[in-house]
Image: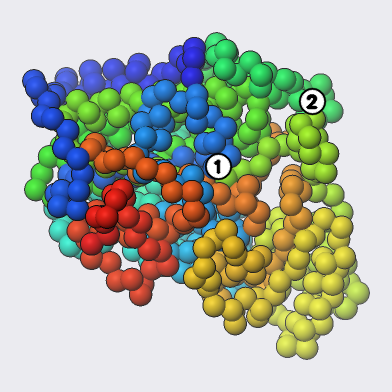
Amino acid sequence: MTETPPVKLKALTTALAVALCAAGAGASFAQDSAPPVQKVTAATPPPKLIVMIAVDQFSADLFAEYRSHFTAGLARLASGAVFPSGYQSHGATETCPGHSTILTGNHPAHTGIIANNFFDLSTSREDKRLYCAEDETVAGTSSGSGKYAASVNHLLVPTLGDLMKARDPNAQVVSVAGKDRAAIMMGGRKADELMWLVPTGLTSYRGQALSPTATQASTAIAAAIAQPRPGLTLPADCAAHDIAIPIGDKGGSVGTGRLARDGGDFRKFMASPEADGAVLATAAALRQVRKMGEGSTTDLLIVGLSATDYVGHSTGAEGSEMCMQMAGLDRELGDFFARLDATGIDYAVALTADHGGHDMPERNRQNAWPAAERIDKTLDPDAIGKAVAEKLGLPQPLLYSDGPFGDMYLAKTLTPAQRKAALAELTARFRAQRQVEAVVTGEELASRPISKHAPDTWSLLDKLRASYNPERSGDFIVVLKPRVTPIPESGLGYVATHGSVWDYDRRVPILFWRKGLQGFEQPNAVMTVDILPTLASLIGLPVDANKIDGRCLDLISGAESSCR
């Protein structure tokens, strides 16, 4: 993209490099004369480093819209093996479930990560809501208060890194992300280092102290967060997106922002290319110090980039802010790959997203989709549950939910007869709501097999089944109609979101690149659960096909196959 806005990756990278050199770890691995590029064939040895990148809310629509403008990192990936119609095939298209599929090869039905939040009404904790990446057994913690103990405990299956470690304990696995749930769900249980961004820089979980390099990175990131940033220069390519969309009732608007922020504003830091730069710079520094990709085995470097999601939620997917974020993401990835290129290491990259996203309805209505709307405040599950409890004479609270759609849980104190009556009354009331597409019971999904067909042919029930786990899912699930944004007001800080069963939230790009890999494009539908078996085959790691939902994607154009 022309006039790429200035990004802080280089400044942050320089700060880290200075710190590393001071620690005696700043050696360069650049070669004096690079060997000629060899074409990747079925006989080519496994790469020494796998880089897995997940870009939060990077929908297939965004990739298609900006693809012709990419000139750096994303342009490189678009020259490799491109699957533009990848799918987070399940119904609950949220951050935690999506990340849980990428390096496990399994749908949320099997990973157990059915949503960002779900309910365990049998827990003794007063707060029955569980965060997907918490350990609720830690005393004094609560996901509702935001004070929780981050944990991988809810993930039921191993990750690629776990399998690599089981084969060879010397294999290094490092996971760095903007969000804890991204780092944890992709990093798994055996990562050597696992960390994410917080207002004070970086943090980890399981009580682990940051390594010296991560500590230096954390200090540099904290300093960057503390600094105010002026607005970025609008690239010429973004001018058509520079249209103000009114929000709220106080004269505010989005669409013409320049990603400026005050010093110490962590939320706006996260909604800027600088947050992605911080993660990439940290990942590059850790790779360098740990000499990942330079040993006798293949290492795994996991990178979770969250800024696109923060921008999408706070300003929508089609404003100037997202256009600048796409330009920044492209450049940051280009800088990151340049650092890897300088090492001479044979590395392979996979990039995808945890889910897609939908633009705010106010902009949709201006741009040829007048039916887009926000959810009606009357579709309030707490109010509906209370009304049903009062009508049937049942104890309260009767219904537990995390919002106006998704999993709904009935109180465990009900007798079988009460439960039957409550379920019938509640499902009827939700089905009567104008903005509700369907209400499906857990019993309907439990008896249904997970589809083995291409994800673009799945029915609504197929999508919901891939998210259904009988131990964790609700008694019934509410599905909203297409393009109903489940945020009742536009001035709440979040103006747009995702999470639906519809393809604008399910479709994501899946890209693979390796030096010497002949590029090709396969427009047929594939799934993010296919990434684990594809990468495992690339490094000669056996995977039990009966324990995963995905399949290996052949990355070699022609008669040969990378699926071993």
Residue at the image point whose x is 73% and y is 63% from the top: 478
31 to the left or right of 234 = left
Frontmost residue, 452 versus 420? 452
Residue at point 66%, 19% (across, down): 240
Dot 1 amino acid type: Ser
Crowding around mark 1 (Cα neighbors within 10 Å: few <14, some 14 to 19, many 20+) is many
Which numbered tag is attached to residue 246?
A: 2
Residue on which disc 1 sits: 59
Q: Distance between the residues labelled 2 and 1?
A: 24 Å
In the rendered image, is residue 166 in sight? yes
Q: Dividing the picture into quarters, in which one does residue 352 lie?
A: top left
Amino acid type shown at disc 2: Pro
Whichever of labels 2 and 1 marks the residue nearer the N terminus, that label is 1
- What numbered label is drawn on residue 234? none
Residue 503, x across and y down, in percent: 62, 51
Q: In this view, does 520 lie above or below 439?
A: above
In the rendered image, the residue lying farthest to the right is: 391
| Left or right, residue 78 beside residue 382 | left
Quadrant of the rendered structure where residue 489 is? top right
Give the class, few, some or many, for how many residues have Cα within 10 Å of label 2's Cα (few <14, many ≥20). some
